[in-house]
């Protein structure tokens, strides 16, 4: 007998909104039934509704993030795309400028503190560090190339570089960072894994930035657009 392996991950956002509202199996069925090939909604939707970032100094100085997407199509027909829900401990960094887009705020909450500078300064952050299990960045990378399981795993592995480029610090003891990978196999020919993996990382970093910039924010969790992070 074959035992199906169903990969899954969760995003902890019970501190935002009503913690009694929980997804059920019906939500999964309804999501699948309503899926389309149109533009994907971004920002404070779906898994991104309660996502936040910049929690090195605690939730009181955090900011709102959400769901982001990015994709690219090469002249030869190769498509690589990423979608990510960002609920990270660290700051969101725009790799093209190295500027903080969203993250831990200053004591007065009116500006970005820059987690990179806080760590370098030896500043006293949240006692004990971020709580394990309360933060995570969950993403998926997809391509139309035909990949084996090993190649799909490699694409996901390389896509984690996108996390490192756009989140600082990342992969902390308080984060449960995960990336899933899938391939439709509709593009004929042998895949060029170097390109697939490299583009997966680029699309992931772009999607992470969009997860922050497309958020509208909440009263106690301002967004990048509200605080002027980008």
Image (cartoon, rainbow, N blue to C red):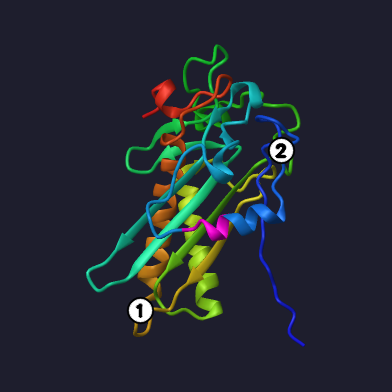
- Whether residue 146 is in magenta: the answer is no
Quadrant that contains the C terminus = top left
| Helix, strand or loop status at disc 2 | loop
Q: Kindly identify the residue that appears in the image at 65 percent across and 52 percent down.
A: 27
Q: Residue at x 36, y 57 (%)?
A: 71
In the displayed image of the protein, which residue is found farthest to the left?
75
Q: Which mark is residue 21?
A: 2
- Crowd around label 1: few <14 · some 14–19 · many ≥20 (10 Å): some
Image coordinates for residue 214, horizontal then vertical, percent:
42, 36
**Could you tell me if residue 86 is visible in this image?**
no
Residue nearer the viewer, 207 or 34:
34
Residue that appears at 40% across and 76% down: 145
Q: Secondary structure at mark 1?
A: loop
Residue 165: where, in percent of width, then height? 45, 47
Q: What span is in magenta? A: 31-35
Q: CA distance from mark 2 to mark 1?
A: 41 Å
Comparing marks 2 and 1, which lies closer to the viewer?
Answer: 2
Estimate the x, y position of residue 137 in percent, counting from the top left: 58, 47
Q: Quadrant of residue 218?
A: top right
Q: 144 or 167, which is in the foreground?
A: 144
Q: Quadrant of the N terminus?
A: bottom right
Name the foreground residue: 64 vs 199.
64
Q: Quadrant of residue 210?
A: top left
Identify the residue under disc 1.
Answer: 187
């Amino acid at each position: 007998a074959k035992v199906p392996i169903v990969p899954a991950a969760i995003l902890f956002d019970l501190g935002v909104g009503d913690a009694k509202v929980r997804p059920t199996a019906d939500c999964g069925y309804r999501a699948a039934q309503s899926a389309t090939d149109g533009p994907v909604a971004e920002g404070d939707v779906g898994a991104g509704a309660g996502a936040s970032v910049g929690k090195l100094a605690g939730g009181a100085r955090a900011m709102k993030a959400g769901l982001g997407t990015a994709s690219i199509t090469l002249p030869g027909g190769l498509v690589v795309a990423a979608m990510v829900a960002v609920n990270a401990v660290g700051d969101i960094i725009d790799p093209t400028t190295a500027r903080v887009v969203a993250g831990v705020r200053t004591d007065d909450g009116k500006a970005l503190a820059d987690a990179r500078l806080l760590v370098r300064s030896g500043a006293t952050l949240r006692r004990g560090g971020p709580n394990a299990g309360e933060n995570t960045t969950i993403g998926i990378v997809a391509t139309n190339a035909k990949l084996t399981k090993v190649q799909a795993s490699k694409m996901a592995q390389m896509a984690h570089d996108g996390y490192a480029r756009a989140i600082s610090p990342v992969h902390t003891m308080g984060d449960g960072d995960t990336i899933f990978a899938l391939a439709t196999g509709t593009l004929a020919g042998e895949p060029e894994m170097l390109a697939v993996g490299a583009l997966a990382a680029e699309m992931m970093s772009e999607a992470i930035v969009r997860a922050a910039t497309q958020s509208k924010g909440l009263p106690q969790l301002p967004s990048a657009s509200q605080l002027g992070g980008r």
